[in-house]
Image (spheres, helix red, strand yellow):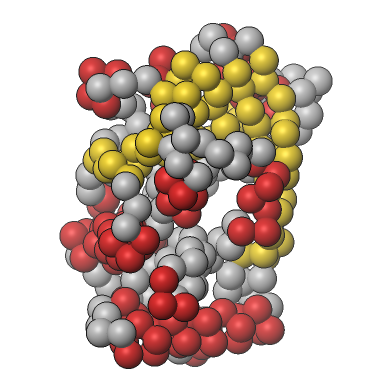
Amino acid sequence: MDPTVADQFLQSVNEFNERAARLGFTDTENYYWYHTVELPHGLLTPGLYDIRAALGEFRFPDDMRGMSVLDVGSATGFFAFEFARRGARVVSVELPSLYALDRFPGQRIEQTLDKIGEMIVPRSLDAMRGYVRKYTAEELYFYLLEGPFEFCRKLLKAPVERCLSTVYDLSEAKLGATFDLVFMGDILLHTLNPLQALAAVAPLCRGALVLAQVIPGQPEDKPVMAYVGGDTPGSDEVSWWLPNMACIIQLLKKLGFRNVMEIGRNRGVLRPSGFAYDRPILRAVK
C-alpha cells in the first residue's frame, strides 16, 4: 500500500463523513464508495475509483438527450448519473442481493462475504491495513450497493430507473425496451459464465456497447480465456475468467456486433492501495 495515497484517501473519507454528518447524514461512515461522485453541498464521495479525469476516453456524446442507456452493474452509480446528467434516459442494473453473486461450486455465501468485506473501507488507517468488519449479507448489500447509490441518486435528483437483476436474467421482456447504448464495466470478470452474460446483454443493444475492464493481449493474439479463480478450497476470489482482447472481440462479433474497436484507456490509481491501473475501453457497434 502506498502510504501517501492511503493517507490522502483516509483524509478524503474523514472529510466526507464530517461534512455529511454536519448536513444530517449519520450513516455514511459505513458506506463503501466504489466511485467518486460529485454531489451537492460540496460533498465528494471517497471512491476507490475516481473516473473523472479519464471520462473523455470513453467518448460518450456530450448531449445524450433522446438516447436510452443501460448501465449494467452500476455500483455507486458514477456512470448512470453521468448519462442522466447528459440528458439520457437511464436504466441502472444491479444485483437483487449478494446471494445472487456467482459463486464457485461448493463455495458458501459466508466465504463470499468475507472476500467482499476485505474491500470495505474502515474509518482509520490502522484498520485500513488489516481490519475486516463483519456484516450480514443484507447489511453488506446495503452498505456496498443500495445505500451509496440511493444516497447519490437522492441528492442529485437523478431520473435514473433501477432494475434489480443478475446479468444473466436481463431481457427485453424484463426491461421493456432495447437501448441505444449499453455500458458494462468490471462485470465479466465476476461471472462464472461470461459468454452467457454477453449473450444476455447483446440483444438489448440496438446501437453501441461500451465495455471497460481488464483485457490482456492484442487483437491479433490467439483468442483465449484465462481462469483466475485460484485453486484453494474454501476461498472465494469473486473473480473467475479473464478473456483476452482477441477472445472478447471475436465473441462480440459472433453475437452480432459488426465493428469492435478500442477507443481509449481508463487509467488511474486505485485507492487506498495506490495501485495504478490501465484498462482498455472497447466500443462494439451493430
For the point 57% across and 32% down, the residue is: 210
Q: Nearer the viewer, residue 231 or 74?
A: 74
* Observer able to see residue 196: no
State left or right for residue 89 relative to residue 173: right
For the point 61% across and 83% down, the residue is: 8
State left or right for residue 73 relative to residue 207: left
Q: Does residue 281 lie above or below 20 as drawn?
A: above
Q: Nearer the viewer, residue 241 or 31?
A: 31
Residue 16 at what x, y percent from top left? 44, 81
Residue 181 at what x, y percent from top left? 49, 28
Residue 92 at what x, y percent from top left? 35, 41
Tally of numbered tags:
0
Q: Quadrant of the C terminus?
A: top right
Q: Quadrant of the N terminus?
A: bottom right
State left or right for residue 136 relative to residue 21: left
State left or right for residue 190 relative to residue 134: right
Q: Does residue 19 lie above or below 189 as drawn?
A: below
Q: Does residue 97 lie above or below 16 as drawn?
A: above
* Observer able to see residue 167: yes
For the point 52% across and 19% down, the residue is: 207
For the point 61% across and 59% down, the residue is: 52
